[in-house]
Structure formats: structure tokens, C-alpha cells
Image: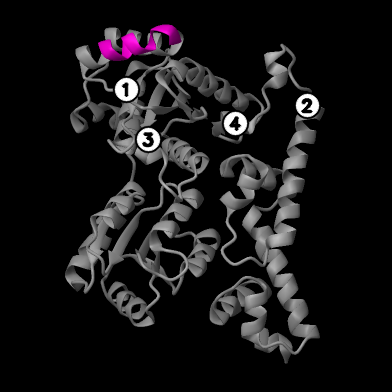
Amino acid sequence: MYNVLVVDDEPLICKGLCSLLASSGLAISQLFTAHNCYEAMDYLRMEDIDLLITDIQMGEMSGIQLMHQAKMIKPWLPAIVISAHETFQYAQLAIRLGAKDYLIKPLNGEQFLDAVRNVLLGVNKAVPPQDETLAGFREQFRLEQPTPERTALLHRLLAEPASAAETAERLQARFGTELSGPYYAVFRVRLGAASELLQYAALNVAMELLDREWRPVAFYDGDDAVAVIVQWSDARYEENGTNKIDQLDMLGRSLHANIAKYLRVPCVVGISQILRGAAFLGELGAQAAKAVRWNEEHRELGVFYYGDFSWARYAQGQEPSEEEMAARNNLIVAKAKAYIDEHYAQKGLTLHEVAQKNHVSPNYLSYLFKKNTGHNLWEYVIKLRMEESRRLILHTDLRRYEIAERVGYESPEHFSKIFKKVYGVSPTELKK
């Protein structure tokens, strides 16, 4: 059974789509509706959503921005976009963020249900045993087995920065491998088991996931790992509204989730920073390899961004003590809590905003916050909002819509739903 979230600022459209879905015969357990993106984000954080269906144009926050935030919360979440705008730019952005379909209003009911059905079929379909999965990879994908010569050249690209330009030209001439950047980042995926077939399968998953959008170049990196170089053109890198650390975090978590799901093998993903120029590929490769090392300190975490950790002591040949690392982590959490304490009533507060203030990735901040406090970051935000709203209900004469506004909710109805979920009674019932 599946949970579906429908987001549109026109209530009649939400109602119509939900009616279609409810009578479709699809295995839908719960249907959630939101009339703006802020409400939708609450559902994404609090409920186990299997499919997001969203409009594009919706007031202060667009459907594209919602999809980006959804990817930060659940990188594997599929989405279907519905829009009144048959604009290539919107469709391109939606597909880049993983939209499975882009439908134009007015919707054809049968076409809409076909799109939903096709997406849900792939959400939690049974994954065959690992041996069967791997056996089918060579038939399923057309990616050629990497040649030793190409792999050696790519290793040289990372190991010999001085000859990077010459090596890139040879790769292009001999194998059609384009490395034009000019911005690069490197992912290193260490697999939980070593075999050439497993590496080949992981390489295919990475190429399928990143596709042409990131111009990925993937290759074997030792006996138990694969490395992936992703690239940005000047225009892509300068796009507004796209935080690069968020993008890396999203891609790393997607790689980790898909390899774990489809290959049924544990893995660790190390992510480098982004640098301009092929001459820095060696440094980026080393960063990604170092990031993987942090799995030794944090076994329960599988994705590591190089910029989250302090490497100064390592550069001097000194490993920081457990006490030093704990103190740094405690400081990150304390700063995050202080920021939330001050801004919890801000409408549209996001995890990546809090992470940016701490200069760490959203993934690492979420992990540290849960580890240190026992609850996730958004649970803490809701706790503060609900405690303040309860105080206002009991000790002031403010109306429901005024209280909702004061604690960060645009819709009084949505505020009431969250309040009842937390306290078991509605604001009105509590007041009485």
C-alpha cells in the first residue's frame, strides 16, 4: 500500500485528483493534500510518503523548489509534475530533480492515472536475490565493460595533476570520454563486498542515476570501489537557487540508497568538494577517499562529505582525540539548536538553511542532531512550535489564525492538523 501527497494551491484540483486516485483501484493507503509547499514539506517530514504529485506555480514557494527540498529529505522519492505551463525550462528543471512525468493542465484523467500507476509499480517492487540481480545487469544495461587502458588513464588523471590536460585529451580521443568541466567533484563508493561483477553493477547504477545531466565519468577504483567524476559547465554552476553542497549531498545519498536497494550490498560514499580546473582532480579524488575513512568513526552513517570534517590535525600528522571530535560535534549541534530556537517560527524554515549556518552538509547535521539529542531536527522544530502555540492558546485571546501565523504556519487548518497530531486534541478543544 502506498501513501500519496497531492500539492496544488487550487483546492478543487486537489479534491479532483484525490477522487480520481481514491476510485482508481490502485493500492493507495493514504492520500494527503497540501495547498502550498510549506504544508507539503511538513507531510514529507512527518509521514512516509511514496509519491509526490505537485503543481509548479504556487505562491511564495514553487513546485520546483518543493521538489528540491523533497530530494533533500528523501532523495529516492519519485514525483509527478502537473502544470498549466508547457515551458521547456520548467520541464527540464523538473526532470533534473527526478520527476517521472510532466503533465499539462487540463489533465486527462486516464493519462494521469497511467502516470501514477507506472510510478507506483517501481516504488517498492520486489528486488530479486543479489545473484539474480547481478546476473541480469549485463543484459539490462548497454554500458561496455571498462577497459584496463581507460581505467589506467582515469587513475592517472587523479594521480598526476600535472598531466591532467594531456590525459583528458587522450581519453577523449581514444574512448570519447569528455572532461570539459570546468567545475568538478568526485564521488568514491566503497562496496561492502569485492567482485568485478559487483563493481560493474555499481558502475551501471551510478551512470543510470546521474545520466547525462551531470556528465558523469565512472571507473573502477581498486578492488572494492568505484569512482565517479561529475561536472558543471559555467552556466550550470552559476544557476541561481541551487546550493552546491545540497546538490552533492542529494547525489551522494541517492547513490547510497540505490546501490543498497538494487544490489543489496552495503556501501560507503565519500564526496569531495567542488573545484575549478582538471588540474585539481587529483586533490578531489584524495578528498573523496579521505571522506570514506570517516565511516570508521561513524559506522551508522553511509554518506560523508569531505567539507564536514576538520582535516588540519590530520595534515600535521596528528589524529584528533575522541574528546576533540566530540567537542566539535557538540558545538555544531549547539549552534544548530540556537539557530532553531531563534528562527523556529520562520515560515519555510529548512534543514539546509540551518546546515548552511553551520557550514556542514544537511546529511551530516541531521545525523549529529539525532545522535546527540535523540530526535531528528524537524521534530525539534515542531516541538518548539507546538509548545509556543499551546502557551498562546491557554494564556492569550489570540485567534487560531493569529497563533498559526506566529508559529510559522500559513494555513490555520494545517496548523490544527499538526496540533491535533501532537496533542490529541484540536486548538479549539484545548481552549475549551
Q: Nearer the viewer, mark 2 or mark 4?
A: 4
Amino acid type at circle 4 is: Gly
Q: Is residue 368 visible?
A: yes
Q: Nearer the viewer, mark 3 or mark 1?
A: 3
Front residue of 200/313: it is 313
Decide if residue 230 is on the left or right side of residue 271. Answer: left
Which residue has dot 2 on it? 322
Q: How much space separates mark 1 and mark 4, taking CA atoms? A: 24 Å
Residue 258 spot, x, y in % from top left: 39, 38
Which residue has dot 3 on it? 234
Quadrant in the rendering for residue 348? bottom right
Residue 85 spot, x, y in % from top left: 26, 66
Q: Earlier in the sequence, mark 2 or mark 4?
A: 4
Q: How much space separates mark 3 and mark 1, taking CA atoms? A: 14 Å
- Tags 3 and 1 in contact by the CB under 8 Å rule? no
Q: Give the colouring mode of the picture.
A: one colour
Q: Earlier in the sequence, mark 2 or mark 1?
A: 1
Decide if residue 111 is on the left or right side of residue 288. Answer: left
Which residue has dot 1 on it? 179
Residue, x 46% and y 24% (percent of image)? 188
Crowd tier of the residue under label 2, counting other residues whose Cα lies within 10 Å: few below 14, some 14–19, many 20 or above:
few
Q: Earlier in the sequence, mark 4 or mark 3?
A: 3
Q: Quadrant of the N terminus?
A: bottom left
Q: Nearer the viewer, mark 4 or mark 3?
A: 3
Residues drawn in magenta: 160-170
Front residue of 357/412: it is 357
